[in-house]
Amino acid sequence: MIVKIPIEETNKILELYTNGVSCCKIAKMYGVTCTPVSNFLKKQGISIITSKDFIKIPLNKHKNIINEYLSGLSAIEISKRYNVSSQNIINILKRNNIERRQTKEYLRKYPVNEAYFDIIDTQDKAYFLGFLYADGCNHNCKVISMNLSAIDKDFLSRLNNLVHPQGKKLYFSKSRKSLFKDRGYIINTKESYNMCIESVHIAQKLNEYGCVPRKSLILTFPEWLSQELLPHFVRGYFDGDGSMSMYGKGEVKSQAYVSIVSSLLFTNRLKEKLKEILGIDSRILSRYKTPIGELRIVNTQYVKKFLSWIYKDSTIHLPRKYENYLKFKAIRDEIENRPKPICKICGGEYYGLGYCKKHHHQNYMKNKRIQFDSADQSHN
């Protein structure tokens, strides 16, 4: 016969079990069999652990073990901390539906912060995501890689350290020439460095965010991203696949335009966002008769407004592009802060040739009459 547990003792049973007392010991304390105790715990949504595992690792330690595993530690490393076998750790992970890493991942030399991209809630994460949208490669949702020029090595190391807390070596590629006989041209590849993130969890998370494998023609805009983090994301994309070119007469290049290349799905939505948030007009140029578009901002005032928006309160950016922005901003600020000319007759708003609109017209008509009078005299 199965004896029932008194209702008033249920909270105490939960406390005992959480603090490491097994079902059998609790049953003996109340003079009942293990069945009513285990049934009660199951109704409370608690998974029952074998006595062997329970004695070694109390239930209140399981959350810590899960967090340690998600932070990059292997089951073997965690088992040494708790002085248990790695199988005990694996059993806990299985009961809590934690997906185990592949052999390649837990044998890796450099730990990875697996949870880095789980929530995009800082400007560093939003910027890094934008850069991966532009220049990253998601290899079958298993590995993430990104290749940058050798001149950007220090910057790539900074991004690399965000997901590799203990650092990880970048892979160097020499400059080389690639001949494409069927296409009839040669590609010169410069020296570069490659960052590789070997994490299935991160690759799958980025895939959920829209950074999908073979994304060039199908990349979509991240509608889910908050407006607060949007400028940091766009800055990351701009640093990866955008440019700002300065031009003008003389040595001082005071005019500029911005170019951002992506899929038409992405550039069309970005154009709408810039109009909605900043009131900026831009245009889309279709490239190579493919679903790839180039967003261009050609108005210099709009260029300054866009760059000021993405670089405001920036703590992470590609140094060489940021320096170009500061140079452009200094030139535009100097031009805009120059004293504005006024009409030399009335001191009104300047129109042209030293006059306001009214006196410019009067002077123009006066000069015309002088020209007609001199023409008549020469004719006579």
Image (cartoon, rainbow, N blue to C red):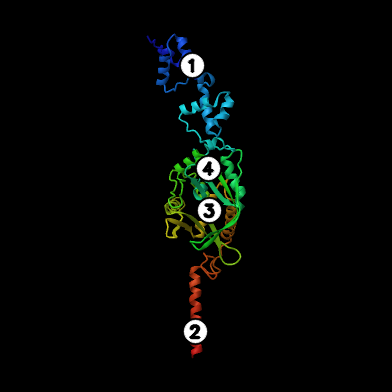
**In the image, what residue type sits under mark 1?**
Ser
Q: Secondary structure at mark 3?
A: helix
Give the image location of residue 205, x and y in percent: 47, 40
Q: Secondary structure at mark 1?
A: loop
The residues bearing labels 1 and 4 have C-alpha atoms spaced at a distance of 43 Å
Which residue is depicted at the point 46% across and 43% down? 207
**In the image, what residue type sits under mark 2?**
Asp
Which residue is depicted at the point 46% across and 18% down? 14
Give the image location of residue 227, x and y in percent: 47, 45
The residues bearing labels 2 and 4 have C-alpha atoms spaced at a distance of 74 Å
**In the image, what residue type sits under mark 4?**
Lys
Foreground: 302 or 183? Answer: 183
Q: Does the rendering let one see residue 19?
A: no
Q: Residues within 10 Å of mark 2 (few under 14, many from 20)?
A: few
Foreground: 182 or 50? Answer: 182
Give the image location of residue 102, x and y in percent: 51, 36
Residue identifier under label 1: 22
Q: Nearer the viewer, mark 3 or mark 1?
A: 1
Residue identifier under label 3: 307
Give the image location of residue 275, x and y in percent: 44, 53
Q: Nearer the viewer, mark 2 or mark 3?
A: 3
Q: Nearer the viewer, mark 2 or mark 4?
A: 4
- Determine which quarter of the picture holds residue 287: bottom left
Q: Earlier in the sequence, mark 1 or mark 2?
A: 1
Q: Earlier in the sequence, mark 3 or mark 1?
A: 1
Residue identifier under label 2: 373
Q: Does the rendering let one see residue 160?
A: yes
The residues bearing labels 1 and 2 have C-alpha atoms spaced at a distance of 116 Å
Q: Is residue 196 above or below residue 374?
A: above
Foreground: 208 or 97? Answer: 97
Q: Which mark is residue 125?
A: 4
Q: Secondary structure at mark 4?
A: helix
